[in-house]
Image (tube, rainbow, N blue to C red):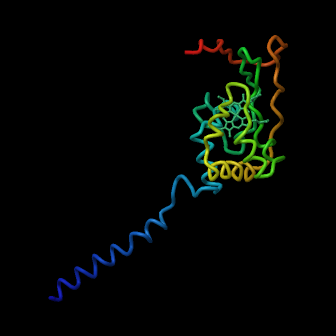
């Protein structure tokens, strides 16, 4: 084996050994399961802010993080009555992580809350959402209470049509 070959082999081996180190060291934009970073990422991409953060969708997501998930007084009206996206900062402050996992796996809410998406989340993502919201801490006031169909509504609302006929 000539010297040049040995040097090249050493370099290649060295480079290969570096790969796992680089993989571990590279910061992941999605965060580790269960981590606060992951929670921030999931909340963002799962659309929780779109309804639970005031004006988030209308301001192209340009709402300071300190105001995220504080609930909204914009009503969602349809055959179910009028619902308001809850203040999750206050809600999660009163739940233990175990209670949150149970709720997220079993609760069914009125439209347009996509509770079925919560049911589909992995434990790691649900824990991450919980830890992230608890990390933000309680803030804001409770959203207006649910108004049954026909009740008096005192806020601006988004009006939904009735659901399409079942296929
Ligand atoms: C399309 C709008 C919308 C989106 C998107 C949305 N929610 Fe909601 N959410 C609502 C509304 C409206 C309610 C109130 C439902 C009711 O009154 O039954 C609600 C209620 C809830 C509740 C019940 C809180 C309580 O006070 O008991 C939880 C928990 C919740 N949402 C979590 C989430 C999470 C986590 C996400 C993101 C994965 C999310 N929501 C995405 C609209 C939305």
| Image quarter (top left, top right, bottom left or bottom right) of the N terminus | bottom left
Would you identify the image quadrant in which residue 105 lies?
A: top right
Would you identify the image quadrant in which residue 75 lies?
A: top right
Point out residue 71 in the picture as x, y percentages from the top left corner: 75, 34
Residue 89 in the figure: left or right of residue 114:
right
| Point 73% across, 24% down: residue | 74
Point out residue 130 in the picture as x, y percentages from the top left corner: 71, 49
- As drawn, 104 above or below 155: below
- As drawn, 88 above or below 72: below
- As drawn, 6 above or below 16: below
| Point 64% across, 56% down: residue | 34
Point out residue 67 in the picture as x, y percentages from the top left corner: 72, 41
| Point 72% across, 32% down: residue | 108
Q: 150 or 70: which is nearer to us?
A: 150
Point out residue 101 in the picture as x, y percentages from the top left corner: 72, 47
Residue 145 in the figure: left or right of residue 48:
right
Q: 24 or 156: which is nearer to us?
A: 24
């Amino acid at each position: 084996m000539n010297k040049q070959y040995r040097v090249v082999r050493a370099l290649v081996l060295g480079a290969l050994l570096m790969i796992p180190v680089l993989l571990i060291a590279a910061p992941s934009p999605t965060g580790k399961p269960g981590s606060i970073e992951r929670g921030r990422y999931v909340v963002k991409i799962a659309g929780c802010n779109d309804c639970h953060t005031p004006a988030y969708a209308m301001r192209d997501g340009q709402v300071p993080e300190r105001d995220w998930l504080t609930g909204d007084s914009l009503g969602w009206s349809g055959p179910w009555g009028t619902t308001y996206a809850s203040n999750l900062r206050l809600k999660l402050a009163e739940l233990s992580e175990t209670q949150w996992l149970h709720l997220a796996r079993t609760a069914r809410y009125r439209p347009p809350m996509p509770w079925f998406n919560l049911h589909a989340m992995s434990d790691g993502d649900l824990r991450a959402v919980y830890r992230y919201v608890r990390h933000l801490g309680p803030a804001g006031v409770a959203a207006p209470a649910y108004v049954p169909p026909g009740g008096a509504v005192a806020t601006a609302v988004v009006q939904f049509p009735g659901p399409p006929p079942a296929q």
